[in-house]
Amino acid sequence: MKRRQKKLRITEADFMLANRRAARLEEIAEHGKPVSFRRAIHKSKKAYNRKRLKKIALPE
């Protein structure tokens, strides 16, 4: 008896992921490094930040 092989179907989600990956690899090849267009959000110095206060208090 021959075993039945599963038919592989490419879903729309798989297609989108493959296109995104290909575009990213192309971009990296073009620029030599990953390019990020997101900007970091500016944090207010007035806002309470426990980590920053601990860094200032500890002499290293």
Image (cartoon, helix red, strand yellow):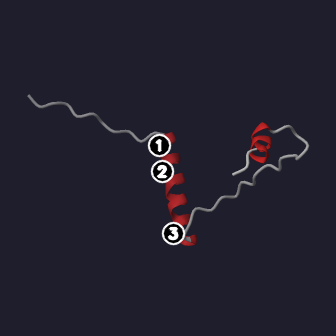
Q: What residue type is labelled 1?
A: Asp
**Residue hosting label 1:** 14
Q: Which residue lies furthest to the left in this view?
A: 1
Q: Is mark 1 on a helix, strand or loop?
A: helix
- The N terminus - image quarter: top left
Q: What residue type is labelled 3?
A: Ala
Mark 2 surroundings within 10 Å by alpha-carbon count, few (fewer than 14), some (14 through 19), many (20 or more): few
Q: In which quarter of the image is residue 33?
A: bottom right
Q: What residue type is labelled 2?
A: Ala
Residue 43: horizontal and vertical position, in percent? 83, 47
Front residue of this view, candidates 36 and 56: 56
Answer with left or right where residue 58 lies relative to residue 21: right
Q: Measure how far apart labels 2 and 3 are at the Cα level.
A: 16 Å
Picture residue at 54% right of the left edge, 52% below the top: 20
Picture residue at 80% right of the left edge, 42% below the top: 53
Mark closest to the chain's N terminus, 3 or 1:
1
Cβ–Cβ under 8 Å for marks 2 and 1: yes
Mark closest to the chain's N terminus, 2 or 3:
2
**Residue hosting label 2:** 18
Instruction: Name above or below for residue 3 compared with residue 11.
Output: above
Answer with left or right where residue 57 lies relative to residue 4: right
Label at residue 1? none
Picture residue at 11% right of the left edge, 31% below the top: 2
Residue 14: horizontal and vertical position, in percent? 47, 43
**Residue hosting label 3:** 29
Residue 56: horizontal and vertical position, in percent? 79, 47
Residue 41: horizontal and vertical position, in percent? 79, 49
Mark in front: 2 vs 3: 3
Front residue of this view, candidates 48 and 4: 48
Instruction: Name above or below for residue 2 compared with residue 40.
Output: above
Mark in front: 3 vs 1: 3
Q: Is mark 3 on a helix, strand or loop?
A: helix
